[in-house]
Amino acid sequence: MSQQPTPHNQQEEEINLREELEKYLRYWPWFLISVFLCLIIAFVYLRYTAPIFQSTATIIVKDEEKGGNVPGLEAFEGLGLLRGMGGSGIENEMGILRSKQLITDVTKQLQLNVRVFVEGDVLTSEIYENKPIEILVLNLDENKLKDNQEKEALEFDFTEVGEESFTIQDGFSEKDITGKYGTPIDLKFATIIINKNPDFIEKEETDDEISISFSTIDATASNYRKKIQLNLTEKNSSLIELNLNDPVKSKARAILDQLIFEYNRQAIEDKNLVAINTAKFIEDRLSIITGELDSVETGKEEFKESNQLTDIEAESEMFIENASDFNKKRQDVNTQLELSNAMIDYVSKDSESDLLPSNLGISETGVNSVISEYNNIVLERNRILRGSTPKNPVIIDLNSQISQIKGNVLQSLLQMRANLKIAKEDLDKQAGVIGSQIASVPGKEKQFRGILRQQNIKEALYLFLLQKREETSLSLAVTAPKAKIVDRAYSMDAPVSPKKKIIFLAALILGILIPFLIIYLQQLLNNKIHSQQDMQAAIKAIPLVGEVPRIGRGESEVITKNDRSVLSESFRILHTNLQYLLVNAGVSKGANVLFVTSSVKGEGKTFTAFNLALTLANSGNKVLIMGADLRNPQLQRYEMDSRDFKGISDYLVNSELELKSLIKTSEIHNDLDLLASGSVPPNPSELWRTSRTESLFESLKEDYDYIVVDTAPVMLVTDTFLINKYADLTLYVTRAGYTEKKLLNFALDAKKDGKLHDVSFVLNDVKIANFGYGNKYGYSYGVEKQGFWEKLKARF
């Protein structure tokens, strides 16, 4: 069963949270300054950063109809072994759209490597549509441009001089080159022509400077290839969205539209490769058949003239009717044999495109199917090769399939020709039988029929090829694009970057985060005491009797009688708290002996002891301040003449000296006496061990109300431990921003071991912001209010 938090625990957690927040809220001016500066930086960034806009186009890639499968390979295709042979997937099409060659073609067509910039009051912007000048690049040597190009692009400053001339500053020699509109200019790496744009519309009177930038085509294409993003709108769809982010909307739209155009153009060229090769084959065969047909007709004419023949058909009509069916079969066989011979010759030749003619009228369906499948695989390989390399595993696999199927094509054609030859031989044998039947026909008639037969064969083949040529031409004319444009390129009105709301929000968060992290790291890495909160663990065993504020520049280190400063009030509070401690200590008679010590040098014990003595003297008490630090006396900082006085060390050494002769009245206050340290002895510890030490303190108690003893630091020497038994109270001084937290353990151990008794802490040099409970309630009551900057300086 979980334990419910008690109201006390809830209150403690609330107080702890409030204290943690107070550590940061006290620095609120720095948070405001940081937020203000970050917002200013964000504003300047947005002011001087060119906005980036997104342009989008959408296309649908049409699915290509798969060609016929190779006979006998259907089972392998079903097992997925011939995947990719029937067409290209959507991933391949996206790869082609991203290909370097396609982007390079777009770069060349739109001349993206040549840009025109106009320098405005704030930004230097690229102009694309409404350009004052048009640049035509006649030739470009990219190697020279790359060698002389220090940055991503080589820039030239353009200045118009008069109506027909201009000057551009040479990027190589920084010399001006003067040219005329419409005249070629030699730039060492390129030859260009600059013309005025007749459609240029000047929006306002301006003298903005124009610059021309040249970069290599490869670098420009690579840059835009990285920027163009392709996304499928749905997982299983063929709808592709093309995105391009660019500062110039019109340029981005032109790039996307041109990319789609180039993609369709290449796809159409791929589709037309088979038709083009078929048309070339038909033209070659028509040329041969035309010559053969002319030769047969000429022979027929000469035969008739030499034999004076007119109508031989009427004489042999009976025989022709009987043999018509037979002749038709022979004609078909001869036609197919002629086509098979032509195809075998064509396949045997090495062709650059590797594509085979199709739809020639070959009667064997298996041969036609193998040829169609072969062409589809060749086209697939060529398309993928544009966006890949010959070492691509898919290309290697396709090449292997092409070689295998080509062998199947040749084997099928050879088998077909062998079958046709057998059929022809059979028909020839039958021709001998028919020939014997018409033996009665004169030899001239027989010879004439042979000539006529050859003529019919050639005419049939000629007409057949003419028909196929028209069909091929028609297929070339009606080829449809591969990508259907759903949305032409359009641009968003709002920029995609930089986004003002996000930038300002980030600036606001950063403005808060920077001081927070600085303060957090400062507190995390700081091992010094800064406020009484840092002493919480220690003051549970040793009370904190007072805090002394930090003294500003120009302020006095010594308090006066009617002083109303924060320093004076802090010592008055220290005085009040001492009264309660003295009562609790049971001090009943004689002077109150107050030891003031510290852990190490520099923590302000002398400063605290002297001002405490002055505060006690201002209250009407007879006070003596003793310089008990015999090794490093410091009272001369406030009593300049005390360095020459004889004092405690002299009294302890010389028994003939009278104590009263060593005591001097302070120059600062009449009720304050001073007993200086005296000469610096070589053995202070041995002097404090003498019997005169006890008589020293006993004698002084008879004449004073308070004796304030400025002792040596307890961590460095043992002097204070030796005389601490004479103290009624021991004030242990720590210094904010100087005393390390771990040194508090030394004071705790000294009290625990009995080396120091009736110990109380005094925290010195505290910032106003850390004073008391954070100075929330205005400690300096009655003091004239400070201005904001004075408070800020005092706080930090």
Image (cartoon, rainbow, N blue to C red):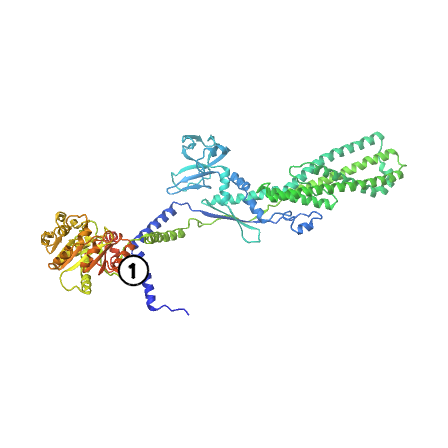
Which residue is most to the right? 440
Residue at mark 1: 537
Q: Which residue is found at the position 86% from the left and 43% from the top?
A: 322
Instruction: Tell me the crowding category of disc 1: few under 14, some 14 to 19, or many 20 or more residues within 10 angstroms, Cα based.
Output: few
In depth, the one of 524 and 328 nearer the eye is 524
Let me know if residue 475 appears in the view.
no
**Residue 613 in the image, given as x and y percentages of width and height:** 15, 56
Q: Left or right: where does residue 232 sit relative to residue 791?
A: right
Image quadrant holding the N terminus, namely: bottom left
**Residue 519 in the image, given as x and y percentages of width and height:** 32, 53
Q: Left or right: where does residue 782 sit relative to residue 149?
A: left
Choose top left, top right, bottom left or bottom right for residue 178.
Answer: top left
Q: Please count the marks in the image.
A: 1
Choose top left, top right, bottom left or bottom right for residue 248.
Answer: top left
Circle 1: residue type: Ala
Q: Secondary structure at mark 1?
A: loop
Q: Left or right: where does residue 588 sit relative to residue 392?
A: left
**Residue 372 in the image, given as x and y percentages of width and height:** 68, 45
Let me know if residue 585 appears in the view.
yes
Q: Left or right: where does residue 16 sit relative to residue 667?
A: right
**Residue 751 in the image, given as x and y percentages of width and height:** 25, 59
In depth, the one of 661 and 212 nearer the eye is 661
Q: Which residue is found at the position 84% from the left and 34% from the top?
A: 447
Q: Is residue 774 above or below residue 313?
A: below
